[in-house]
Amino acid sequence: MKMTRIQKPLSLILCLVLVAAMALCATGCGKSHDTPRPLLYAEDCALGQGATQFELTVADAEGSEVVFDISTDQTTVGAALQELELIEGEEGDYGLYVKSVNGIIADYDLNGTYWAFYINGEYAMSGVDVTEIEEGAAYALRVEK
């Protein structure tokens, strides 16, 4: 069966359109990490119930802060914050790698930022998940680069 003069160019154009459509679909499959997520809490507040209290300051990359007065019966800062769904992350070789705090994402693999953990104003030498809660201590999680 012979192709007519119109069928050859039409087949070529159709193939090019199909390739272009597939390329557009493939580029649209990636996740958009620049979409801002809403804050869980936009203002200072008290959260939780329990016998132990501590303060947590959460600072985003622009320096905006929200202060939480946390009450809990958990023994570690990480467990208390996970119970209140304030932090999310992944378990790794060195413990919990915090990626999201109060709805704010800081992921080194995505944008070179991470959540730095502070205890009473000093950079913590332990992870949030293994840090025992000290009554009245001030903890902070800050986005850093």
Image (tube, grey):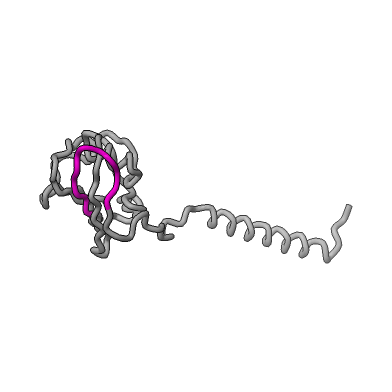
Residue 35, quarter of the rendered image: bottom left
The outermost residue toward the right is: 1
How many labels sit on residues?
A: 0
Q: Residue at x 14, y 41 (%)?
A: 135
Magenta residue check for 51? yes
Q: Nearer the viewer, residue 47 or 94?
A: 47
Say whether residue 103 is left or right of residue 125: right
Which quarter of the image is occupied by the C terminus? bottom left
Location of residue 16 with respect to 100 vertically, above or below: below
Q: Residue at x 32, y 40 (%)?
A: 82
- Relative image position of residue 123 (x, y in whole percent): 13, 49
Q: Residue at x 21, y 50 (%)?
A: 56
Q: Residue at x 20, y 48 (%)?
A: 117
Q: Nearer the viewer, residue 5 or 113?
A: 113
Residue 44, quarter of the rendered image: bottom left
- Relative image position of residue 142 (x, y in whole percent): 23, 54
- Relative image position of residue 58 (x, y in whole percent): 25, 54
Q: Nearer the viewer, residue 51 or 57?
A: 51
- Relative image position of residue 17 (x, y in whole percent): 68, 62
Give the extent of the magenta segment.
46-57
Identify the main secondary structure in magenta: strand
Say whether residue 57 is left or right of residue 32: left
Say whether residue 68 is left or right of residue 8: left
